[in-house]
Amino acid sequence: MADQYQYNTNEEKIVKDSHTKEIDLINRDPKQINEDVVKVEFEDVIAEPDGTHSLDGVWRLSYTTFTVSKYWCYRVLSAVFGIPVALLWGFLFACISFCHIWAVVPCIKSCLIESQCVSRIYSLCIQTFCDPFFEALGKIFSSVRVALRKEV
């Protein structure tokens, strides 16, 4: 909480808003979560083996067509659907956070409290019934001696 506030020279409190923080428009995948997934180039999709080559002009035009159409298709799709999908993902993660904070964690805490109670009862039963039994068995078999002989 203290990290959200800064003080200027007049000692006025300035609140940093995490919703309007500055974003990096150059490196848009700083954690590299899509590094291996969507990096598809022309050479990854289309390749002509030796002995089966198209005309050089066709190959260049195919490369340009693939690259430009992929670029603009992504741009148009992100312009049309980017904001609605971001809204849906924001809503989904808000719901997940809400459920986790208000349902999952309290439920787990409740189960832990109940299991501690059961654990104490179980421990008491083991100490009462099993400990004396195994202690008696240990005393019975404590006088048993095992001797190994090697016969040649």
Image: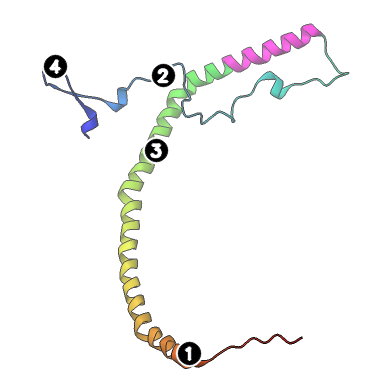
Q: Quadrant of residue 74?
A: top right
**Boundaries of the magenta span:** 56-72
Residue at position x 68%, y 10% in the image: 64
Q: Are marks 4 and 2 in contact (CB under 8 Å)?
A: no
| Amino acid type, residue under disc 3 in the picture | Phe
Q: Quadrant of residue 39?
A: top right
Query: Is 87 or 141 nearer to us in this picture?
Result: 141
Pointer 3 local density, CA inside 10 Å: few below 14, some 14–19, many at least 20: few
| Amino acid type, residue under disc 1 in the picture | Ser
Foreground label between 1 and 2: 1
Spatial CA span between label 4 and label 2: 28 Å
* SS for dot 2: loop
Residue that badge 2 annotates: 24
Is 14 located above or below residue 149 in the figure? above
Pointer 2 local density, CA inside 10 Å: few below 14, some 14–19, many at least 20: few
Residue that badge 4 annotates: 9
Spatial CA span between label 4 and label 3: 38 Å
Q: Are marks 4 and 3 in contact (CB under 8 Å)?
A: no
Spatial CA span between label 1 and label 4: 80 Å
Foreground label between 1 and 3: 1
* SS for dot 4: loop
* SS for dot 1: helix
Is 71 located above or below residue 110 in the figure? above
Residue located farthest toward the front when viewing the structure as drawn: 152
Residue that badge 1 annotates: 142
Foreground label between 2 and 3: 2
